[in-house]
Amino acid sequence: MSLPVVTSYRFDTDDHPEQTRFEMWREVMAATHEVARAGTTPEPFHIQVAAWRLGQMVVTSGQLTSQSFARSGENIRRDHIDHFGLFVQGSGTRHCQVGSHTELLRENNIQIVDFAQAESSRATAGNSGTLYLPRDLVEDVIPNFSRFHGRVMRDSMAALFARHILAMGTSLPYLPATALPNLTQATMEMAFACLQSLESGSWEMNSAVVLAMRRRVERYIESQLESPDISPATVAYACDMSRTTLYRLFEPHGGVMTYVKRRRLHRIRAILIANEDLRSLAGISEDYGFQSGAHFSREFRKEFGCSPGEVRGDRLPQINATALPEADLGVILRSLHS
């Protein structure tokens, strides 16, 4: 008889006295979000949430009481979670805000969340699930995926994948461990099939030819981030297009060199989080085209809300989440890098 899939993390307010339930939940969530109760006369507080590690991914499932969530620059600076989340709304609704843009999520809607960017939401009571994917895993397939932060997917492909994620939350506790490799592979393939459909409906440009051109340029830039010679002229030449065409492709990103700068900043942040590069901050930033440490630090803080020194200085030790049954979700996500 095969063993069941092991739950990496579980939290249930029924395990705690009623008067302490919200404070316990707020402490659980403090690593990634600030939470608050909804309304002036809050309903009885109940949370039941579990998380499972599937290879490089983490899937969570939960029943939640009405509440609000906010992920701020301080959370981002402190937790160093370098992931995208595919948040799935089950029953209930959720109002989500990214900058000045607000979306209403209903049943089987999926919202893309970049954990390196701020967001907030207000949820009614209901159930939900989230699939967490490491940034490098996603951006190997879809470069600059962070541009979709806050996007809500409501099409038939999204609804199908949403039902898959929600079903995993109810089925995983009863599946044999031997089923995990095939389930992990199928889930990853479904996720990328769903995400790649975003390209055909891009907010910025949606013709197949334009999308193919932009993807080619993005992949070239990603391979040249340490090159001191990268410029609109060299990119246009390498990708066999005119500079006018290149400028049009990257106008929504503020220009091609603005795009290059952001990709370099995100690459450096990933290096600092991984904690495997012994070079000085000045050496790393110089290798990625920043002419001075002051300029690099200023641009890094503008992008992430903290200094590069804080990211490197606040790094946490690598953790084996399976050895810590009481580990919070932030610990589980950071363990994916180990």
Image (tube, rainbow, N blue to C red):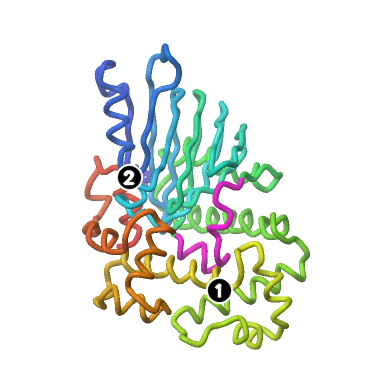
Q: How many marks?
A: 2
Give percent across and percent down for residue 137. Answer: 47, 64
Q: Is residue 150 magenta?
A: yes
How packed is label 1: few (under 14 Cα within 10 Å), some, or many (20 or more)? some
Q: Is residue 262 left or right of residue 277?
A: right
The front one of 220 and 303 is 303
| Residue 198 shows in the view | yes
| Residue 179 shows in the view | no
User: Residue 259 is drawn in which quadrant?
Assistant: bottom right
Q: Are marks 2 and 1 in contact (CB under 8 Å)?
A: no
Type of amino acid under label 2 = Ser
The front one of 194 and 23 is 23
Residue 335 position (above or below residue 270): above
Q: Is residue 200 left or right of residue 16?
A: right
Q: Residue at x 70, y 74 (%)?
A: 213
Secondary structure under tag 2 reads: loop
Which is more N-terminal, label 1 or label 2? 2
Give percent across and percent down for residue 316. Answer: 23, 56
Type of amino acid under label 1 = Met
Q: Which residue is mark 2?
A: 8
Q: Residue at x 38, y 70 (%)?
A: 295
Q: Residue at x 29, y 22 (%)?
A: 21
Q: Is residue 31 magenta?
A: no
The stretch in magenta equals 135-151
Number of the label disc, if any, that sits on residue 148: none
Q: Which residue is mark 1?
A: 257
Give percent across and percent down for residue 275. Answer: 27, 68
Residue 84 position (above or below residue 123): below
Give percent across and percent down for residue 246. Answer: 68, 76
